[in-house]
Image: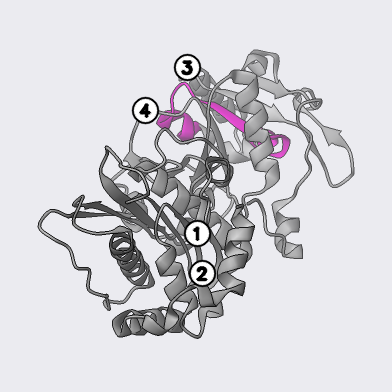
Amino acid sequence: MGIKSAFFLAINFPNCYNFAAMDPEIHQLVQTIHDCRSKLVLVAAGAGTQALSDLLGVAGATRTLLEALIPYSEAAFNEFLGQKPPQYVADETARLLAGRAFTRARWLNPGGQRVIGLACTATIITDRPKRGQHRAHIATWQPSRLICHRIQLHKGTRDRAGEEDIVSRILLNSLAQACGFQQRVPVPLTAGDALIVNVTDFRQLIEQLQRTEIKYFSISDNGHTVSDQSPPELLLSGAFNPLHDGHLEMARVAGQLHGKEVAFELAVDNADKTPLEKSVSLQRISQFAGRYTIFASNAPTFIAKARLYPGTTFIVGYDTAVRILHPRYYGNSVENLETALDEIITRGCHFLVAGRTGEDGVFRRARDLGIPAKYRDLFERIPSSLFRKDISSSELRRTGGKGSR
């Protein structure tokens, strides 16, 4: 059964669930969740479908649930995740699933601020003995934080329905926590069970960056965070307002040309604009959830970036390359411009330039930049035969385009 057909059954045949026997405390919690009007995409594999039943069994589910997916087969699981994970039931995998669910929620609810990606991957009692632990990993992804629950169940103390009940209760409680209220349903754990909760607060990283306590930080596709780590080899910087297919295709081609993984960078402080507010930074960073590594820094210019990320190749579009070579960004001084470019070379950095069609309809590429002979080796071109995608972020904003998913 595919993802869509599984969800079709849940929606169109509600009598297959025993709604009448719902625990009153669960009913009350679900009602509170529906009333808070957060929007949700839920992904559950291995367990957690009772939580979906509970969400659907209380009036008002359309206020909460954007979509529910049950990727039971490996093919469905891998397709949703965009890769085959090293382990299907693991913390890293739950994080990735939640990130993908969050990205899906943003796509289905454009402009919405209160969206949540909720994921569960579990292995519990089945019709054959299992050597490993009975466990579940549950994650909720939001712009401000990532919350992970890991439950290890004491084998042999419950039947499948009992283990499903425990996982689904924790899943509903994690959703309640993501919605920001204290109400919970009781989870009847035994001494042999183990529940671990881990919270990653993205807001703290932005605040540390704003206070210049750290130079930069990164959030990987699975939500792990690192500050002042080893610099990326290939980096595509931008405002990402919004992240769109042009950015992603440029990164894909650059990675293909250099045979390396590409990361992205959001400059919270921009040479042409006022610094981004914390909430705006979090929203733009969240576009990469479950998909790509995103760096964030206060480096508004490429000389500042070269000091942060020595040895990095910066992927830029033609318009950005024009600004890199313009004295305006160096105090209107050609001497300062050359000093900056000399330092960028000294720090082992380069530029990989993609062409772009201007407002006059003319496609321009690196060779049209008029690069001084001394600096030609600093700039490498992306052949137009490999990349030519003219997407304007300002046009997407003007027309209400959704960007990438």
Q: Which residue is mark 4?
A: 230
User: Disc 2 residue type?
Assistant: Gln
Disc 4 secondary structure class: loop
For this rendering, which residue is in front, 177 or 150? 150
Give the mark, 3 or 1, whose residue is nearer the N terminus. Answer: 1
Disc 2 secondary structure class: loop
Relative to 164, residue 299 above or below: above
Farthest left residue in view: 191
Q: Which residue is mark 2?
A: 113
Q: Name the mark on residue 283.
A: 1
Residue 350 occupies quadrant = top right
Whether residue 164 can be seen here? yes
Left or right: 390 with respect to 171? right
User: Disc 1 residue type?
Assistant: Gln
Q: Nearer the viewer, mark 2 or mark 4?
A: 2
Give the mark, 3 or 4, whose residue is nearer the N terminus. Answer: 4
Relative to 298, residue 40 above or below: below
Q: CA distance from mark 2 to mark 1?
A: 8 Å
Q: Name the mark on residue 94.
A: none
Residue 130 point in image, percent of width and height: 30, 41
User: Disc 3 residue type?
Assistant: Thr
Disc 1 secondary structure class: helix
Q: CA distance from mark 3 to mark 1?
A: 35 Å
Q: CA distance from mark 2 to mark 3?
A: 43 Å
Please report contact status of discs 2 and 1: CB closer than 8 Å, yes or no: yes
Q: CA distance from mark 3 to mark 4?
A: 18 Å
Q: Name the mark on residue 346.
A: 3
Farthest right residue in view: 361
User: Disc 4 residue type?
Assistant: Ser
The magenta-colored residue range is: 303-323
Left or right: 385 with respect to 327? right
Left or right: 250 with respect to 190? right
